[in-house]
C-alpha cells in the first residue's frame, strides 16, 4: 500500500519538479504576481 500518488513520490521526476515548483512559488511569488510587478517596474 502506498501513501500517495505516483506523481508525488521521490522515485519519479514529476515529484521532484512539483516540489521545486512549489518552493519557487513560495520564494518568488506566483507567476501572475511577478508578471504584474515586472509590468509596473517597466512602466508598461
Image (spheres, helix red, strand yellow):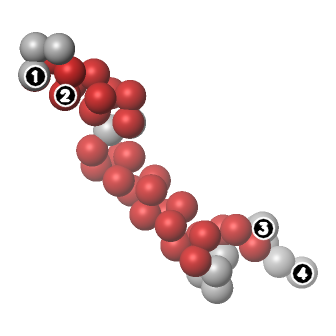
Please identify, in this view, whether the residue under mark 3 or under mark 1 is nearer the observer.
1
**Is residue 3 shown left or right of residue 31?**
right
Label 2 element class: helix
Cα distance in 3D space between marks 2 and 1: 5 Å
Q: Which labelled disc corresponds to residue 5?
A: 3
At x 27% / y 44%, what residue is drawn?
28
At x 59% / y 70%, what residue is drawn?
15
Q: Earlier in the sequence, mark 3 or mark 1?
A: 3
Q: Earlier in the sequence, mark 2 or mark 3?
A: 3
Cα distance in 3D space between marks 1 and 4: 51 Å
Label 4 crowding class (10 Å Cα cut-off): few <14, some 14-19, many 20+? Answer: few
Q: Mark 4 points at which residue?
A: 1
Please identify, in this view, whether the residue under mark 3 or under mark 4 is nearer the observer.
3
Mark 3 and mark 4 in contact? Answer it, CB < 8 Å: no
Which percent across, then down, holds residue 19? 49, 63
Label 3 crowding class (10 Å Cα cut-off): few <14, some 14-19, many 20+? Answer: few
**Is residue 40 shown left or right of residue 9?**
left
Cα distance in 3D space between marks 3 and 1: 41 Å
Q: Name the residue under label 1.
A: 41
Q: Earlier in the sequence, mark 4 or mark 2?
A: 4
Q: Mark 2 points at which residue?
A: 38
Label 3 element class: loop
Cα distance in 3D space between marks 3 and 4: 11 Å
**Is residue 12 shown left or right of residue 25?**
right
Label 1 element class: helix
In the image shown, does 39 or 34 lie closer to the viewer?
39
Amino acid at each position: 500500500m502506498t501513501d500517495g500518488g505516483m506523481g508525488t513520490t521521490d522515485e519519479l521526476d514529476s515529484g521532484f519538479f512539483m516540489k521545486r515548483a512549489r518552493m519557487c512559488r513560495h520564494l518568488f511569488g506566483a507567476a501572475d504576481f511577478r508578471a504584474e510587478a515586472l509590468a509596473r517596474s517597466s512602466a508598461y
